Amino acid sequence: MQIFFKCNGEWVHQNEHVSEESLDESSGLKVREVFINVTRQQVEDFHGPEDYWCQCVAWSHLGTSKSRKASVRIAYLRKNFEQDPQGREVPIEGMIVLHCRPPEGVPAAEVEWLKNEEPIDSEQDENIDTRADHNLIIRQARLSDSGNYTCMAANIVAKRRSLSATVVVYVDGSWEVWSEWSVCSPECEHLRIRECTAPPPRNGGKFCEGLSQESENCTDGLCILDKKPLHEIKPQSIENASDIALYSGLGAAVVAVAVLVIGVTLYRRSQSDYGVDVIDSSALTGGFQTFNFKTVRQGNSLLLNSSMQPDLTVSRTYSGPICLQDPLDKELMTEASLFNPLSDIKVKVQSSFMVSLGVSERAEYHGKNHSGTFPHGNNRSFSTIHPRNKTPYIQNLSSLPTRTELRTTGVFGHLGGRLVMPNTGVSLLIPHGAIPEENSWEIYMSINQGEPSLQSDGSEVLLSPEVTCGPPDMIVTTPFALTIPHCADVSSEHWNIHLKKRTQQGKWEEVMSVEDESTSCYCLLDPFACHVLLDSFGTYALTGEPITDCAVKQLKVAVFGCMSCNSLDYNLRVYCVDNTPWAFQEVVSDERHQGGQLLEEPKLLHFKGNTFSLQISVLDIPPFLWRIKPFTACQEVPFSRVWCSNWQPLHCAFSLERYTPTTTQLSCKICIRQLKGHEQILQVQTSILESERETITFFAQEDSTFPAQTGPKAFKIPYSIRQRICATFDTPNAKGKDWQMLAQKNSINRNLSYFATQSSPSAVILNLWEARHQHDGDLDSLACALEEIGRTHTKLSNIAESQLDEADFNYSRQNGL
């Protein structure tokens, strides 16, 4: 027997196996036991789409046997509860529900409730239930249920205590019955009383409503005083006093309203001496800086065009938050047209206080109409901002690092190979035989890092990077596979996605819609990437046209932090970028230049095309340790900036300040939410000292260190097995067991007419499988498909699953794994 371990789809080296043999006393057979050791470091260094896993594969002359997968995870328990229980005041016999969401942990934390520091045993008290989602439920509150309740969470790593919640069970008092009427008094009245004692109010309960005593005439109106029945007598002095109080109150109210109106009018006039309300000055210079508007009429050097001279007659200083489109291109958080050189423009913009708090009143712009501004309100149409010429208005901008084109090359021949651009999700598969024998080509691949040359029309948005592969005059005999990442939440109901190619004249033309039937190329759209079969090189990109406002772009949200020049300040930068590895690599590159550190694993946010803006806020800042600068805790980004931000990474900056230099730990929450959409929470828990900070890996999965792989080692399916599969499935079969079923079993169900035009449909299907599964661990999916078809197909008897497992093992061994 041969026994090997496979971990995360890769074969474990034979030297790491430990084997023991023993004799089964009952059967007399020899038993072989093999095991491997998995260290914590191995698990921490692994970054894949699922947990670290291992399985055992055994071979003998009888066949192959596989064990189930065993997962290995590192145990932890975060410090902060996702939801602490909240204090309640409930009436007696009312229901009490205390919610508790324990901290995230592996394994999941077990929850225990304490009352006044004593454990609660729900099995001994049928009135209490602690089994429902970690919540504490008291079905009928009793006075004895008042107290302080604490949620305890624990796993094998640690124990955590929530904040205590005070529960008060109160009693609203009720009236006793009325007493008997008293004897008739000389004033011809009798009385009766009642007491608020049935029961009396307790623990802050409400006192009884109504009168505690009652009186009425006891002679049925026959008792006369001054020739009037007693119950009709009203002293004149009381009536006069009531009139005086009424008129005095009305007069005072009128005077107060008049004073308020006059004060507000004078204040607005004093403010209107500006001619404008001042926008956040940090929009011009980035970060949290101060900007002074002077009293003189002169060109402002900070504006894009000094010919624009605002008429400002009062000096005032404003500072506040700003959401920037890119660290190297500090644009305003208002529309780009604000600083166009227009002589007749007048601007009225909210102050930073109004912007930060998200007041519903929008900025007003008066002047010429400009194409490119995004519609607000309920208008569901889409448009793209086309930035005008951006003259640098930041000092020393030329000293900042400029972007270079991402590019990789490799020399390929008849055996084919794979060209990968690390950490971008972009790759190129050259099939075996695509290049004629005795020929070789230097093939290159690049990604445009500058402003996209594809200018979207109407509602169309760019969903992927612009990828160029060449040389353009190269001719292939078999379609090559180009993999391009995208950021759309794939749904044919909400998106119409197109593949476009740039012509030699620089114009873009549509190649096909991914849902259309075509014989010139094939598009296979996966959740995060599109695999395209093509027969000509060039520049390609994916665009999307939202069909409904439920169309969703997937955004990756991440938070970086770094110390500022002031030792007490700490800067947080929250990024919202298209969910493609390439876009996030741009962010990482910029942050490395600025000394930023990733503070939390990036998360996915679904951003709807419903024209509603994005809000980013900082929550739960520890009091007495940190403070955030005034009016900067919440920032809002217009919809258009998020929807069309595929070129320049969008981020918002927050500045926090320590009260003392001894504070080194920071914990807070970053909430990123779209109005009338989804939200995501980033939990920041870090040390601002680099020596104490936990390092978080930038990328979930590293691509190959060697961008170009040539020959057999670039392919998972060995060439000999590939030939057998093609010979089996290319031949038409009466029962339909041919290449069409091979395609369907590999989830290729659309546009099958494309494969029918190929000389070997099965070979092209396998090329697509290779491109689609370059990061998957092994050949299991293909083996299962062949096994399922082979149950009724005699020609597949020589392509057993054991041979594919052996091929998988050999593939890993050839690549030094």
Image: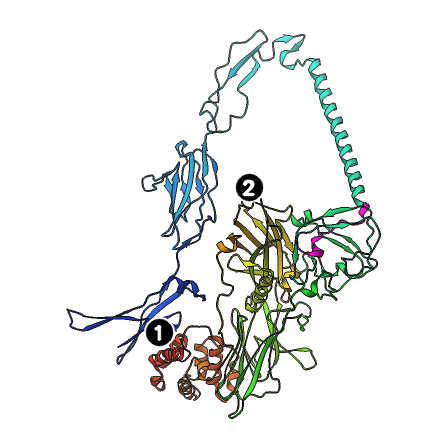
User: Which residue sits at x=65%, y=8%?
Assistant: 225
Q: Which residues are magenta?
A: 273-286
Q: Can you name the residue that lies furthest to the bottom here?
A: 438
Mark 2 lies on residue = 624
Q: Is residue 394 left or right of residue 808?
A: right
Residue 482: percent from left, percent from top: 54, 78
Whether residue 813 is visible: yes
Residue 756: percent from left, percent from top: 51, 86
In the picture, the quarter occupied by the N terminus is bottom left
Tell me: residue 186, above or below residue 537. Answer: above
Tell me: residue 736, above or below residue 580. Answer: below
Disc 2 element: loop
Viewer-side residue, 667 vs 799? 667
Determine the CA span between mark 2 and mark 1: 54 Å
Q: Is residue 735 left or right of residue 224?
A: left
Kind of residue indicated by mark 1:
His
Disc 1 element: loop
Q: Which mark is residue 13?
A: 1
In the picture, the quarter occupied by the C terminus is bottom left
Viewer-side residue, 441 vs 671? 441
285 in magenta: yes
Tell me: residue 133, above or below residue 342. Answer: above
Q: Which mark is residue 603?
A: none
Tell me: residue 814, above or below residue 603. Answer: below
Residue 128: percent from left, percent from top: 37, 40
Q: Is residue 351 left or right of residue 20?
A: right
Which picture quadrant has residue 139? Answer: top left
User: Which residue sits at x=68%, y=65%?
Assistant: 399
Residue 752: percent from left, percent from top: 51, 81
Kind of residue indicated by mark 2:
Phe
Viewer-side residue, 125 vs 660? 660
